[in-house]
């Protein structure tokens, strides 16, 4: 089956490929709140100077919670379906590392349509640290990759990253608001060319370009 880099008329339902689909509005508010608390927990654990007895007690409490919550584990690869007011349907992996709303490792970076592309605001805590006080370069690449892939997806041309180039222009600070933007810049056969930037105080700290390749879906 040949796929051309042009908007697909209708996205296939991931359920047809055996994936669990979760409606965005069906996610319990309590789960979102718990995920937020776990993010704060990770930051607290990463920076704590508590004494060994307190650490052992905390470890046992967390282990008990892990066992309790793990007993009702969802499948890996579950998809989140968002129905927009204009009728558009958007799919994302529920536990996406960068944007997944239920992934405590994700900040999460929420991207919305703006200026012909996507835009999102994010503040990263000390668990995203590379050099002292600065965001890890690999994480910067991850955020750019997500913004680049999502730009192609929202333009109706979802694909996989074939090539990603990152330029680190200035240090990207932790615990400070960052703006992420991305857009499609061109297409050629199955290739979708995309570009993205991360800004702090209006200044670009990192920018990336990628080639996303549209893939043929079975059937
Ligand atoms: C809506 C959802 C939003 C969610 C956003 C998620 C963001 C995150 C995105 C990711 O991180 S994706 C995960 C990381 N990427 C991968 O795991 C992809 C692994 N690589 C592959 O599966 C294949 O290499 C790939 C599908 C990308 C391409 O294989 P194909 O066999 O389908 O393509 P082919 O080799 O025939 O090449 C197609 C075109 O792409 C070009 N191409 C392929 N690889 C390239 C490369 N590395 N660099 C430059 N161009 C490349 C290739 O030259 C050719 O160009 P032409 O049309 O001009 O002939």
Image (cartoon, rainbow, N blue to C red):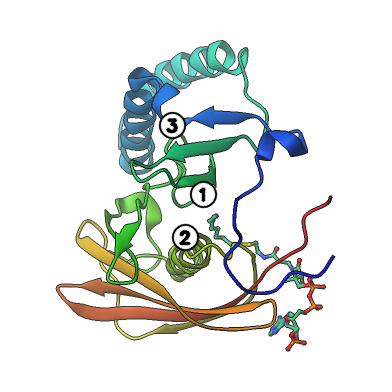
* Residue 72 spot, x, y in % from top left: 61, 14
Q: Is residue 113 visible?
A: yes
Secondary structure, mark 1, is loop
Residue hosting label 3: 24
* Residue 69 spot, x, y in % from top left: 54, 15
Residue 219 horizontal side relative to residue 30, left or right: right
Real-space Cα separation, disc 1 to disc 3, in angstroms: 17 Å
Secondary structure, mark 2, is helix
Q: Do the residues labelled 1 and 3 touch (CB within 8 Å)?
A: no
Distance from mark 2 CB to nearest ligand 1 atom below 8 Å: yes
Nearer the observer, 44 or 6: 6
Within-10-Å neighbours for mark 3: few <14, some 14–19, many 20+: some
* Residue 205 spot, x, y in % from top left: 30, 79
Residue hosting label 2: 154
Q: Which residue is drawn at 44% across and 63% down?
A: 143
Residue 41 horizontal side relative to residue 218, left or right: left
Q: Are marks 3 and 2 in contact (CB under 8 Å)?
A: no
Residue hosting label 1: 97
Q: Residue at x 28, y 55 (%)?
A: 122
Residue 51 horizontal side relative to residue 139, left or right: left
Closer mark to the observer between disc 1 and disc 2: 2
Within-10-Å neighbours for mark 1: few <14, some 14–19, many 20+: many
> Which residue occupies the extreme left position in the image?
201
Quarter, ligand 1: bottom right
Nearer the observer, 56 or 85: 85
Real-space Cα separation, disc 1 to disc 2, in angstroms: 18 Å
Q: In the rendered structure, which disc, 1 or 2, sits on the residue that comes first in sequence?
A: 1
* 10 relative to 32, above or below: below
């Amino acid at each position: 089956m040949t796929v051309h880099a042009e908007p697909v008329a209708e996205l296939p339902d991931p359920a047809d490929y055996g994936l669990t689909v979760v409606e965005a509005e069906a996610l319990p508010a309590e789960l979102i709140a718990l995920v937020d608390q776990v993010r704060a927990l990770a930051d607290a654990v990463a920076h704590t100077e508590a004494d060994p007895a307190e650490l052992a007690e905390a470890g046992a409490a967390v282990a008990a919670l892990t066992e309790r919550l793990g007993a009702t584990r969802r499948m890996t690869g579950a998809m989140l379906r968002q129905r927009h007011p204009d009728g558009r349907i958007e799919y994302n992996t529920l536990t996406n590392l960068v944007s997944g709303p239920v992934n405590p490792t994700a900040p999460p970076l929420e991207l919305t349509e703006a200026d012909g592309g996507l835009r999102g605001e994010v503040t990263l805590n000390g668990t995203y640290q590379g050099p002292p006080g600065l965001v890890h370069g690999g994480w910067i690449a991850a955020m750019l990759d997500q913004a680049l892939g999502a730009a192609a997806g929202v333009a109706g041309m979802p694909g996989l990253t074939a090539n990603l180039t990152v330029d680190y222009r200035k240090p990207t600070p932790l615990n400070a608001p960052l703006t992420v933007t991305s857009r499609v810049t061109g297409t050629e056969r199955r290739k979708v060319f995309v570009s993205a930037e991360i800004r702090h105080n209006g200044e670009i700290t990192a920018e990336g370009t990628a080639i996303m390749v549209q893939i043929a879906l079975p059937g």
